[in-house]
Amino acid sequence: MSDLKGPRGAPDIRPPESATFQRIMRSAEDAFVRYGFKRIDTPAFEHTEVFTRTQEATGDMVTKEMYEFKDRSGRSLTLRPEGTAPVIRAVLEHNLHRAGLPVKLYYFSTSFRYERPQEGRQRAFHQLGVEAVGAPGPGIDAEVIELGTRVFQMIGLDAELFINSIGHPGCREEYLPKLTAFLESHFDELDEDCQRKTKTNPLRTFDCKVPRDRQILEGAPLITDFLCDDCREHFSGVQRFLADAEVEFRLDPRLVRGLDYYTRTTFAFLVPTLGAQNEVGGGGRYDGLSEMLGGPPLPGIGFGLGADRILRALGKQGKVLDEGIDTFVVSTSEEFRSPAISLARLIRDSGMSSDIDYSDKAVKAQFKTADRLGARFVIVVGQREMESKTYTVRNMSTGEEMPVAADELVDYLKGWL
Ligand code: HAM
């Protein structure tokens, strides 16, 4: 065995669970495209500024979590810790917003955060994201949130949706001194992390997982009581549109989310059985982000879904996809290898999967391989089959064998698969 191991917190997604992972991506992509989003791929690293400009100096991601490095020319680059800022950078750089608004984009990306690895929290993880840029809402907020719920429906995962509004910076200007005063009045009772956040970024204390702190925070003033008329109206609009779309949601006035660029609507999808890292997706509005990156005002909203956590949640609910293959072609001897290969090709060209053995194994051993690969049908090619132009097809789940005329084989298989 090699002594080389993958880095900590950066697991490999390998068979058999990679089949379920792939299905998650396919379902998400299917939903994204149906809602009019177009794919974008940005590089895995960006100039560090793309991320530092979008976070207050105290944001955790900047101070603790970024994989920042100097390249050979001494430029400071950073592995993407999240997908939104790079997408907005790309929109602005290529003037995508000039061709009409909103710009609706989706992406699948690996993100990198130097976090303390634990169950559900990785240093390299996969996000499925969408961004609707240049849309003030609230209709688009509801559409993006509805799209998130559709993805979970299509994947077959029960996730609970929570929504909130954290207002625009003006609302927070009024609210934050009240929150800070409350936190300071309980300062000695809070754990060290919350004490630090009280001083640096009080809103983030609501992310605290320590039960005692959470209990204290129950009594904290709530941002929703400080929303200005415009933000309040926007939030009511989002809720009305969601109700029209029959999307079930719960209000959580303590939902602030971990990134500092959010304004107004924030939301999260939770799977309670996942334990501490139970957020399988989340997003929100980021009306000032474009300006932070040197662009014009371009209000936007989006989400990122955590594909690794979704995979884990499906595994826990026993909803994993068996990875099998549609067909396996067995040849009775070396002489029939060539027609067997042609048959596998024909099946593949018809849109079904097929595999074959090249190592001169006996028929029985080939059936064993078919079994190991999870083949749904095995097709035997030999003397008798070639002469009669009829294949013997075994349904591997029932054990039944059927003679099928060569020119009807593809239709026969398609009827089952
Ligand atoms: P985020 O909440 O930081 O938001 O990440 C989105 C999702 O990625 C989380 O809900 C979680 O499922 C998953 N995730 C985050 N960190 C980890 C980790 N260390 N290990 C495994 N999974 C993780 C964003 O990144 C925003 N860009 C989302 C967004 C898009 N907001 C607007 N547009």
Image (cartoon, rainbow, N blue to C red):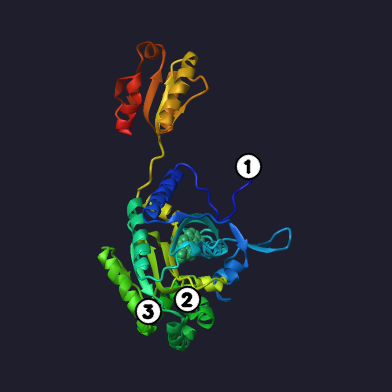
- Residue 16 higher or lower than 35, as above or below: above
Is residue 34 visible in the rendered structure shown here?
yes
**In front: mark 2 or mark 1?**
2
Q: Which secondary structure lies at badge 3?
A: helix
Marks 2 and 1, Cα distance to the nearest angstrom? Answer: 43 Å
Residue at x 45% of width, y 18% of height: 339
- Give the mark, 3 or 2, whose residue is nearer the N terminus: 2
Q: Quadrant of residue 8?
A: bottom right
* Residue behind mark 2: 204
Which kind of residue does numbered mark 2 sit on?
Arg
Marks 3 and 2, Cα distance to the nearest angstrom? Answer: 20 Å
Residue 92: image x %, image y %? 55, 65
* Residue behind mark 3: 231
Tell me the quadrant of the picture where the C terminus can be found: top left
Which kind of residue does numbered mark 3 sit on?
Cys
Q: Which secondary structure lies at badge 1?
A: loop
Seen from the viewer's position, the closer of residues 221 and 353 is 353
Is residue 276 visible in the rendered structure shown here?
no
Labels 3 & 1 near each other (Cβ < 8 A): no
Tell me the quadrant of the picture where the N terminus can be found: top right
Which kind of residue does numbered mark 1 sit on?
Ser
Give the crowd class for mark 1: few <14, some 14-19, many >=20 residues within 10 Å. few
Residue 154: image x %, image y %? 34, 51
**Which mark identifies residue 63?**
none
Seen from the viewer's position, the closer of residues 130 and 248 is 130
Residue at x 51% of width, y 23% of height: 358
